[in-house]
Amino acid sequence: KLKVATIGGGSSYTPELVEGFIKRYDEFPVSELWLVDIEAGKEKLEIVGNLAKRMVKKAGLRIDVHLTLDRREALKDADFVTTQFRVGLLEARAKDERIPLKYGVLGQETNGPGGLFKGLRTIPVILDICRDMEELCPNAWLINFTNPAGMVTEAVLRYSSIKKVVGLCNVPIGMEMGIAKLLGVEHSRIRIDFAGLNHMVYGLDVFVDGESVKEKVFSLLTDANNTSFVKNIPGYGWEPQFLKALNALPCPYHMYYYKTKTMVDKTLESAEKEGTRAEVVQRLEKDLFELYKDENLNIKPPQLEKRGGAYYSDAAVRLITSIYNDKGDIQPVNTMNAGAIASIPYDSAVEVSCIITKDGPRPLTMGDLPVAVRGLVQQIKSFERVAAEAAVTGDYATALLAMCINPLTPSDTVGKEILDDMLEAHKEHLPQF
Ligand code: NAD
Ligand code: G6P
Ligand code: MN
């Protein structure tokens, strides 16, 4: 028996995950897939769960797909637990994105005030899941996809007894795929030395067949069309001399830090025109679930690629498969630093290229980050730590501190206004405050 439990199973990304399990069934013969959701997600779970069953049937595989609202039943004796839940659903995300914009501050779900509040809502739930895991499946691996993935991994490492946790993001794999395409080579020939934090990760070098092509890639990333990599962030291109001097490959989320004004203006503009990303995604999701209802559909529909989490299944299932088979290949994941990045605390979560073994990810030594990026990475790590502490304690002053030390918050006074506004708007999902 090989059992996987997926928390937030009603997500529209589930067909993506199921496709991943089907593709890699030879290497990872999962026999039970338990999709878990809550009362509010019951209808979605039903629809997407039935599609998952049809996909498995069409592939001719014997994977029993179970749909349940009973998390404990799903976790019992699981080998792998994957999480893809969203506390407060897209409605809460829309508030994360709208409220900061009123103050001229970036409205985004994983960066700035929005990222803080998504963390405050999510961390108590993940810690609750960890307590269930301790009791029901103490040997299972927790593969966390739930955002803010870096902060969530940090919180699990710091505040739970679950050590077998890996945080996962599709940005590094998206960058690998995107750069492979720009260079016209197969994905498998590309390797990037990733180091940093989730949504704050840099490529320190890029290799094709083991030879550095960093300079060439820098020159490609000055063109706006080449810098998007994920559907939810448009690309604006990098100043050639800036990139050369930085001497590291930024990820798409770095645009919020190195092009702050442009990104706030563009986010405001599109919020007025077509709605915030959450509102766009609400419409996308509605269309997707209409498609999923079709009894004749038994594959992952291509329309799902309009979501930012493309290649999520590839990233998640290649990771699970490598752990299960002790593959020893290199993958970028969120894990305990353990000295890999010299300028980040030993026991903090980092996003870094790792060798993936049965005993988990072994981070590759990256040494010190370039001096020009070190400070920002450390600042965001401090933000994640303070935010996680606020989520656990429910302490107002700690939450205010997290809000104000975030580089996207312009002042303590504006930070406090945003904090108070958001605490009120989200109070239903913040029982700790
Ligand atoms: P979604 O709004 O569809 O939510 C997924 C499901 O979670 C819903 O069906 C909902 O009912 C359920 N849920 C909410 N609270 C729950 C709880 N306490 N227990 C169990 N289930 C619960 O979200 P989505 O757009 O599919 O995204 C899911 C998650 O994945 C989000 O946290 C999102 O930020 C994250 N995500 C991460 C990445 C990454 O790179 N790591 C990429 C894309 C999405
Ligand atoms: C990717 C990120 C995720 C993010 C998602 C948003 O960029 O890696 O962490 O949450 O896309 O996608 P969406 O389609 O929900 O806006
Ligand atoms: Mn991500």
Image (cartoon, rainbow, N blue to C red):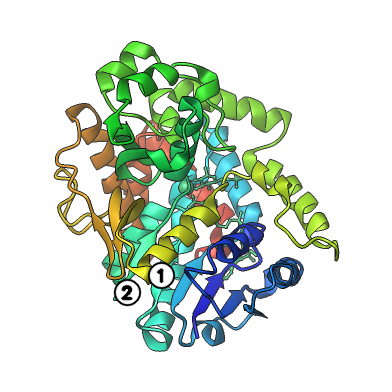
Q: Using the image, determine if residue 315 lies above or below residue 47.
A: above
In this view, the residue farthest toward the top is 241
Observer-nearest residue: 209 or 198?
209
Observer-nearest residue: 279 or 335?
335
Residue located 29% across and 76% down the image: 161
Name the spot of residue 82 as percent of width and height, x first: 49, 68
Residue designated by label 1: 142
Residue located 34% across and 48% down the image: 402
Look at the image and tell me in which quarter the C terminus lies: bottom left
* Mark 2 neighbour class, 10 Å CA radius: few under 14, some 14 to 19, many 20 or more: some
Q: Are marks 1 and 2 in contact (CB under 8 Å)?
A: yes
Residue designated by label 2: 162
Q: Using the image, determine if residue 142 lies above or below residue 23.
A: below
Observer-nearest residue: 213 or 169?
213
Q: Nearer the viewer, mark 1 or mark 2?
A: 1
Would residue 24 be visible to someone looking at this image?
yes
Q: Is residue 353 left or right of residue 65?
A: left
Q: Is residue 398 left or right of residue 51?
A: left
What is the secondary structure assignment of the residue under circle 2?
A: loop
- Place residue 429 in its image quadrant: bottom right
Name the spot of residue 225 as percent of width and height, x first: 55, 21
Would residue 397 be visible to someone looking at this image?
no
Callout 1 amino acid: Leu
Name the spot of residue 410 as percent of width and height, x first: 39, 30
Q: Is residue 409 left or right of residue 13?
A: left
Q: CA distance from mark 1 to mark 2?
A: 8 Å
